[in-house]
Image: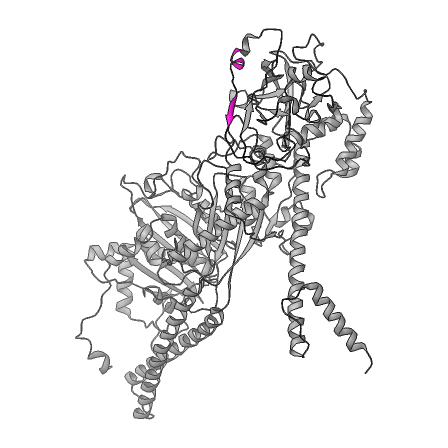
């Protein structure tokens, strides 16, 4: 005691209460400050976290904000460490799932949101209260930070009156002092929202579990307008940030801004990579998400690098220095204890016993910290020379294409979201809609104190650069770039509105739901379940989503909380080295198509309209055949109708790279005059100066999109005339009288047959434009060819008159009985029936004509394509898995044989390895 008192005359470093404000300014994102308190509940092992507000006109802002969890709670000693800035017991723990590392999140986050906070925590029926108030310091003119911390027995509701000789578990740093306790209660009741002791114990009673913590923030920060920064008025079940309170001023009416920047509910739903906590905001449960399983066509890639040693080396050096310092302090503490014990002998005074006990406690604490630090040091040294492996997961966000980018997590906690990489600019479809996800451990990258960025910016940008390369590889692997326009149209997106949400058309919504069925978390066991899509099931309401349990699952294989969680595996991909030239070509081909172009030159996919219209031919039996007549004999026909040529077939007998191709409008010659088409006759030939890649003559012709653009453009070789076009490419359809303006027709559009009215005809091109009854606005008008099988008349077709455009009257198919057509259509459905389709083969057989007419071919074909893709990807994943196991087995056997004296090269092929093993087996079996 003499040694401590002799330094009392020296100047001491002080922590001014102004530091509370300075420390809080590290949080530039308001939700990031709130997330600090959510992190504390997660680290405490909480299963439930309730975030709510209570109105109180006496407080600044008119309300206080509360965080109530059922975590492990804290003893008095743990609460005392809370007010020690920079001290954290999580730093040296072996649990890598702990998010907090700096012992600063509660103070900085709470002070960013409000001026004051009070904490109630419960453990082993001991309640401890922590009061930290800037208002108290300002009004009392106190410069140093003072924190009242009363401690109670929650059974008797009386203060714990322990002494140094009668310590209760968790109260080693607490000794009852009546004067101190009364002063603490006076300050709390004066400067907090709880004005009586009964009010305080009501807060303890809110912690209904055996342990837990309640944090109340009050006197919240206000904006320049005088309103609270946290908007709780607009949505009673959420907490919002208005644009005026965001650093990067977003427009509140801009739908392209992701909701996670505005809504705390949306932000919390993706805050953790694997959510395992039931969170409610304003009495309504948060529907959390597991991002990788909410994406279309997810794929993961393994990234290996030895570059991230810098962080490990720094941690090892720092750990060694701390351990060396601790060893010195432990030796000094043990020496002091031993010296006192020898000098005092058996007799002790009360003061001497108190001093000896404190020294013993101090030495034990130092040894405990040293043991944890030494264990961590050994682990870090073993990890130093290991290759760091990160998993990059990518997928397409078909629910909201504009919300794309990379999500970077650290130890399962979100650090960065919507990082834009891999896209050349915002005006292209290249990598549009792709979401990337990576969870980076702290040993690779260390987050900043506010958990909104990373301390090593250089290493972080290196990581983003590699993620961009893998994202481009994923874009190539999906194959979407070959039919990008048709792909996004299938799910309700328009190319001229890249940053807008998709269409709310029922068909588009249905396609998005079929492609990615809902993944939901059970409200009881917190396990994740995939809900099978069914057209007969109504969408779940908000109340049903919040209370959903495994027993509500229509899938009988996953309708119990006792069953294990079953989520589909994500296929693995591999980065392939590609030249910059190929990457550049891919970007050019993936640019948003102009209104005059149907698709890129490499488009070999079949659009959704083609799938539907092709399948419907089984019921309508519209005959489709290929014209094989020579150019001379069919010149009159080809001049009176639009030629349809596959863009994937070569137009010349030899591949001619780097040549200019001519874009020519083929016009028809008609003896009748059409005043409506005067503008069409003034169109002239234009040159398209693009670089054409070489194409093979043996490439097969793909089906044509029966829905064509009004401004149809043909690509013709500059060196060849129109007579050189392969006549086998021209598709003609059975006779249907050309429509007239005002005629009622139905056509395939967005995967379904929809009725409408003809609003314009063009005899010279053999096309007409119609307006759909469901989409009466001009932007949804679509043009069709006279010969297309995607349209038909509503009712009885008008009698054939003198055709304005020559149509082949030869019908190669005779009439066929309707029951034969239906029989063939049923056989086609049963042949392509997906495993989990809502109809069985027996139900398909029993379908009548009305059932067949209502059968949604578009959804059926989409599901078939999805299932086939998953089967192929699963087969590839299984093949890669078994190949890895075989290679690992080969390596282990090789090492064993080499140790036994039988030399086998480590890098030998699998065939050579099998041959050598066979030879060794033969030698062993030979008699000696």
Q: Is residue 689 magenta?
A: yes
Q: Where is residue 365 drawn, in percent x and y?
A: 38, 76
Q: How is the image coloured?
A: one colour
On screen, residue 669 versus residue 403, left or right, reads right
Q: Nearer the viewer, residue 868 or 906?
A: 906
Whether 82 is drawn above or below 928: the answer is above
Tell me which segment is drawn in magenta: 678-691
Q: Where is residue 295 drawn, in percent x and y?
A: 56, 45
- Quarter occupied by residue 363: bottom left
Whether 676 is drawn above or below 647: the answer is above
Residue depicted at x 36% and y 65%: 79
Residue 165 visible to the viewer: no
Q: Nearer the viewer, residue 87 or 618?
A: 618
On screen, residue 333 versus residue 499, left or right, reads left
Quarter in which the C terminus is drawn: bottom right
Q: Nearer the viewer, residue 90 or 435?
A: 435
Whether 717 is drawn above or below 14: the answer is above
Q: Where is residue 14 drawn, in percent x and y?
A: 22, 65
Q: Where is residue 890 drawn, in percent x and y?
A: 67, 67
Residue depicted at x 70% and y 10%: 798
Q: Nearer the viewer, residue 153 or 101?
A: 101
On screen, residue 459 versus residue 650, left or right, reads left
- Quarter occupied by residue 205: bottom left
């Amino acid at each position: 005691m003499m040694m401590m008192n002799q330094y009392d005359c020296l100047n001491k470093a002080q922590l001014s209460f102004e530091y509370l404000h300075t420390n809080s300014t590290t949080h530039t994102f308001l939700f990031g400050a709130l997330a600090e308190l959510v992190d504390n509940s997660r680290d405490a092992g909480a299963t439930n976290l309730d975030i709510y507000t209570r109105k109180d006109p006496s407080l600044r802002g008119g309300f206080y904000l509360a965080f109530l969890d059922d975590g492990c709670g804290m003893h008095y000693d743990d609460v005392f460490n809370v007010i020690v800035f920079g001290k954290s017991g999580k730093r040296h723990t072996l649990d890598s799932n702990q998010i907090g590392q700096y012992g600063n999140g509660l103070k900085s986050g709470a002070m960013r949101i409000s001026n004051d906070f009070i904490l109630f925590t419960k453990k082993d029926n001991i309640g401890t209260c922590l009061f930290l108030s800037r208002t108290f310091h300002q009004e009392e003119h106190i410069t140093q930070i003072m924190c009242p911390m009363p401690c109670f027995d929650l059974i008797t509701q009386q203060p714990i009156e322990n002494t140094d000789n009668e310590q209760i578990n968790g109260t080693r740093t607490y000794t009852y002092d009546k004067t101190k306790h009364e002063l603490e209660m006076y300050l709390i009741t004066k400067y907090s929202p709880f004005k009586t002791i009964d009010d305080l114990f009501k807060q303890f009673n809110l912690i209904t579990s055996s342990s837990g913590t309640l944090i109340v923030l009050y006197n919240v920060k206000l904006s320049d307008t005088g309103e609270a920064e946290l908007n709780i008025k607009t949505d009673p079940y959420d907490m919002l940030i208005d644009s005026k309170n965001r650093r990067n001023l977003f427009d509140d009416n801009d739908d392209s801004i992701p909701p996670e920047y505005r809504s705390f509910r949306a932000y919390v739903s993706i805050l953790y990579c694997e959510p395992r906590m039931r969170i409610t905001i304003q009495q309504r449960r948060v529907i959390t998400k597991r991002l990788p399983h909410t994406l279309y066509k997810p794929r993961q890639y393994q990234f290996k690098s030895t570059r991230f040693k810098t962080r490990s080396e720094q941690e090892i050096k720092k750990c060694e220095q701390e351990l060396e310092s601790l060893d010195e302090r432990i030796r000094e503490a043990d020496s002091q204890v031993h010296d006192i014990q020898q000098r005092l002998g058996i007799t002790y005074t009360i003061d001497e016993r108190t001093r000896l006990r404190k020294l013993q406690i101090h030495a034990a604490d130092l040894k405990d910290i040293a043991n944890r630090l030494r264990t961590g040091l050994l682990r870090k040294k073993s990890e130093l020379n290991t290759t760091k492996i990160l998993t990059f997961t990518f997928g397409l966000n078909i629910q909201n294409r504009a919300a794309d980018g990379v999500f970077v997590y650290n130890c399962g906690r979100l650090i960065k979201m919507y990082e834009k990489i891999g896209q050349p600019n915002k005006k292209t479809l290249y990598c549009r809609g792709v979401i990337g996800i990576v969870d980076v451990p702290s040993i690779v990258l260390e987050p900043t104190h506010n958990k909104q960025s990373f301390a090593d910016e250089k290493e972080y940008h290196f990581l983003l650069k590699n993620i961009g390369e893998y994202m481009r590889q994923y874009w190539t692997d999906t194959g979407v770039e070959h039919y990008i326009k048709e792909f996004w149209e299938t799910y309700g997106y328009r190319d001229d509105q890249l940053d807008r949400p998709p269409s709310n058309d029922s068909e588009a919504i249905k396609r998005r739901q079929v492609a990615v069925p809902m993944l939901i978390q059970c409200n009881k066991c917190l396990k994740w379940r995939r809900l099978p899509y069914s057209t007969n099931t109504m969408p779940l309401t908000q109340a049903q989503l919040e209370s959903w349990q495994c027993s509500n699952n229509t899938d009988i294989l996953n309708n119990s909380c006792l069953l294990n969680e079953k989520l589909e595996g994500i296929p693995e991909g591999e980065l392939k080295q590609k030249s910059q030239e190929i990457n550049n070509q891919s970007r050019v081909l993936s640019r948003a198509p102009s209104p005059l172009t149907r698709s890129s030159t490499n488009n070999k996919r079949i659009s959704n309209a083609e799938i539907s219209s092709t399948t419907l031919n089984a019921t309508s039996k519209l005959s489709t055949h290929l014209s094989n007549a020579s150019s001379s004999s069919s010149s009159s026909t080809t001049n009176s109708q639009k030629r349809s040529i596959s863009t994937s077939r070569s137009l010349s007998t030899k591949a001619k790279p780097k040549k200019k191709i001519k874009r020519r409008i083929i016009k028809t010659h008609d003896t009748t005059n059409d005043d409506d088409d005067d503008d069409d006759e003034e169109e002239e030939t234009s040159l398209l100066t693009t670089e054409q890649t070489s194409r093979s003559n043996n490439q097969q012709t793909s089906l044509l999109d029966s829905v064509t653009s009004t401004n149809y453009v043909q690509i013709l070789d500059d060196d060849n005339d129109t007579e050189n076009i392969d006549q086998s490419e021209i598709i003609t359809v059975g006779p249907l009288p050309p429509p007239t303006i005002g005629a009622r027709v139905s056509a395939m559009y967005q995967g379904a047959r929809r009725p409408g009215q003809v609003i314009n005809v063009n005899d010279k091109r053999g096309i007409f434009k119609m307006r759909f009854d469901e989409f009466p606005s001009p932007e949804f008008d679509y043009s069709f060819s006279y010969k297309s099988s995607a349209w038909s008349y509503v009712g009885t077709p008008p009698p054939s008159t003198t055709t304005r455009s020559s149509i082949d009257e030869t019908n190669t198919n005779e009439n066929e009985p309707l029951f034969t057509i239906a029989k063939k259509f049923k056989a086609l459905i049963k042949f392509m029936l997906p495993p989990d389709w809502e109809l069985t083969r027996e139900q398909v057989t029993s379908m009548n004509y009305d059932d067949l007419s209502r059968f949604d071919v578009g959804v059926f074909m989409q599901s078939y394509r999805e299932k086939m893709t998953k089967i192929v990807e699963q087969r590839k994943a299984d093949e890669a898995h078994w190949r890895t196991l075989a290679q690992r087995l080969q390596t282990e056997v090789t090492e064993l044989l080499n140790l036994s004296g039988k030399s086998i090269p480590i890098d030998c092929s699998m065939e050579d390895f099998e041959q050598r093993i066979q030879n060794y087996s033969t030698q062993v079996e030979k008699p000696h």
